[in-house]
Image (tube, rainbow, N blue to C red):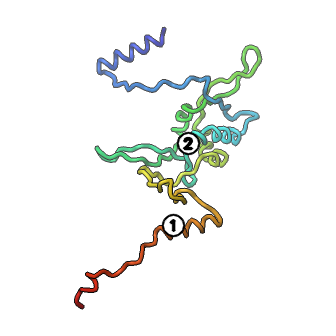
């Protein structure tokens, strides 16, 4: 019931114009997010970095450009022009941005003596160590450039397709086939060329 009251209050404030409230996407329910225990006694930072890397790598939202973890973001350059850029992740951003993809926390003993996952945001120190960790970086997909224009590809026939890599003997055969397709027929002299005065 209190959620409904809070939602109504936010809507009232937004309608009155006193506060600009942008509607947010609903957070993902906790049950389907993976849980990562933060470093503590018996849990090294490298274990945490490896686990976070295994979760974040396949999502392809964070990448490794050179030796820096980056995110691809859209930036408005002018009123009409928008483009994608590499945005290096900072420790302050990682603290909350990672919580969209996984839950961080510590283990605490419950009333029955079992270890219970207690949610807790990572500290800036842990976020800095995560971004610097080779165990985390090696799990992220590498990225070199952003190509935000359509890339032409050859039609599927006639073979070979130029947009598929080929190896070994097939490669040399493919190169010869391409050279044959690109070779222009020999030019023949026409009556007009021979009739020209020198």
- Front-most of 120 and 88? 88
Front-most of residues 163 and 113: 163
Can you tell which quarter of the image residue 107 is in?
top right
Name the residue at 26% across, 81% down.
192
Give the residue at mark 1.
178
Q: Which mark is residue 67?
A: none
Quadrant (top left/top right/bottom left/bottom right) for the C terminus: bottom left
Q: Seen in the image, is 34 located left or right of residue 176?
A: right
Quadrant of residue 94 in the image?
A: top right
Packing grade of label 1 (10 A; few <14, some 14-19, many >=20) is: some
Q: Is residue 164 found left or right of 197 in the rendered image?
A: right
How far apart, in angstroms, are the residues tagged by discs 2 and 1? Answer: 35 Å
Taking the spot 55% from the left edge, 70% from the top edge, the residue there is 176
How far from the left and from the top, in percent, is residue 109? 73, 20
- Badge 2, how many Cα within 10 Å: few under 14, some, many 20+? few
Q: Residue furthest bottom?
A: 198
Q: Are marks 2 and 1 in contact (CB under 8 Å)?
A: no
Q: Position of residue 187 (x, y in %)?
A: 37, 78
Which residue does the image show at 59% across and 30% down from the upper left? 121
Q: Which x, y percent locates residue 154?
A: 47, 56
Name the secondary structure under disc 2: loop
**Vertical placement of residue 191 versus 16, above or below:** below
Camera-nearest label, 2 or 1: 1
Mark 2 and mark 1 lie on one chain; the one further toward the N terminus is 2
- Could you say which is closer to the camera, residue 108 or residue 53? 53
Report the residue marked by disc 2.
60
Single out the residue that lies furthest toward the left: 197
In the rendered image, residue 24, in percent from the top left (x then y), is placed at: 43, 26
Helix, strand or loop at label 1? It is: helix
Q: Quadrant of residue 40?
A: top right
């Amino acid at each position: 019931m209190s959620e409904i009251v809070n939602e109504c209050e936010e809507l009232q404030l937004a309608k009155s114009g006193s506060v600009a409230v942008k509607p947010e996407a609903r957070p993902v329910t906790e049950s389907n997010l993976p849980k990562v225990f933060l470093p503590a006694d018996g849990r090294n930072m490298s274990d945490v970095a490896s686990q976070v890397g295994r979760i974040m790598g396949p999502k392809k939202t964070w990448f490794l450009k050179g030796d820096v973890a980056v995110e691809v973001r859209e930036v408005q350059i002018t009123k009409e022009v928008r483009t994608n850029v590499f945005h290096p992740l900072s420790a302050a951003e990682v603290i909350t941005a990672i919580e969209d993809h996984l839950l961080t926390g510590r283990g605490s003993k419950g009333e029955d003596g079992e270890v219970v996952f207690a949610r807790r945001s990572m500290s800036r120190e842990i976020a800095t160590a995560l971004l610097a960790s080779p165990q985390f970086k090696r799990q992220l997909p590498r990225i070199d450039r952003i190509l935000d224009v359509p890339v032409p590809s050859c039609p599927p026939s006639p073979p070979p397709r130029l947009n598929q890599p080929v190896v070994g003997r097939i490669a040399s055969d493919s190169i010869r086939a391409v050279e044959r397709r690109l070779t222009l027929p020999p030019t023949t002299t026409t009556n007009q060329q021979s009739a020209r005065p020198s």
